[in-house]
Image (spheres, rainbow, N blue to C red):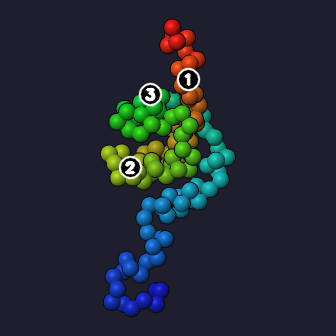
Amino acid sequence: MTGLPKTQPRQARRPALLSGRPVLLAALTIAFGLSAYAQNGNAENGKKLWVKDNCYTCHGYDGHGGAGAKLAPKPIAMAAFIAIVRHPPASSMPTFSEKVIPDSDLRDMWAFLNSIPAAQAVKDVPLLNQ
C-alpha cells in the first residue's frame, strides 16, 4: 500500500510509472538481458523460418512491409523485436508464445532482417538515371 485512503480506486494507488506498455517492454528487455544481444542468430535459418512461420504474408519476403510494419532494413533492437512478437501492440498481429516460435527462432529471424541491405539510392541506379 502507498498509504492512500482505501476509498480511492485500486488503479489510482498504482504509481503512474508502473502502468502501461512501456514498463512491460522495459521489463521484457531486462528479462532477456544482454544474452539476447550476445547471440546474433543465424540469418540463413532466419530466412527459412520467416517463410515457414508466414511472417512474409504481412511483412513481405524481405521485411519491407505490406499489411504489417516495415521491419527491414535496420530492424529494431533484438530484445524489443522479441518483446513485440510476444506482446504486440493493439493491431491485427497475433501474439506468438515461446511454444509457437521459440526465442532462438526469433533471434534467427532478427538476424535475417538485420542482414537485409538498404536499397540503393536512386542516383546510384543507372537505369533510373537515363
> Is label 1 in a helix, a strand or a loop?
loop
Tell me the residue at 54%/44% (across/down).
Answer: 76
Looking at the image, the residue that sits furthest to the top is 130
| Cα separation between marks 1 and 3 | 21 Å
Q: Residue 45: tell me if it is visible.
A: no
For image coordinates 53% across by 20% down, the residue present is 122
Q: Nearer the viewer, residue 101 or 81?
A: 81
Q: Which residue is mark 1?
A: 121
In the picture of the structure, the residue carrying the numbered disc 2 is: 95
Q: Are marks 1 and 2 in contact (CB under 8 Å)?
A: no
Earlier in the chain: of badge 2 and badge 3, it is 3
Q: Which mark's residue is nearer the viewer, 2 or 3?
A: 3
Which residue is more in the foreground, 41 or 15? 15
Q: Residue furthest right?
A: 38
The picture places residue 50, in percent across and down from the top left corner, at: 46, 33
Left or right: residue 129 compared with residue 10: right
Query: Which disc is residue 61 wearing?
Result: 3
Q: Residues within 10 Å of mark 3 (few under 14, many from 20)?
A: some
| CA neighbours of label 2 inside 10 A, class few (<14), some (14 to 19), many (20+) | few
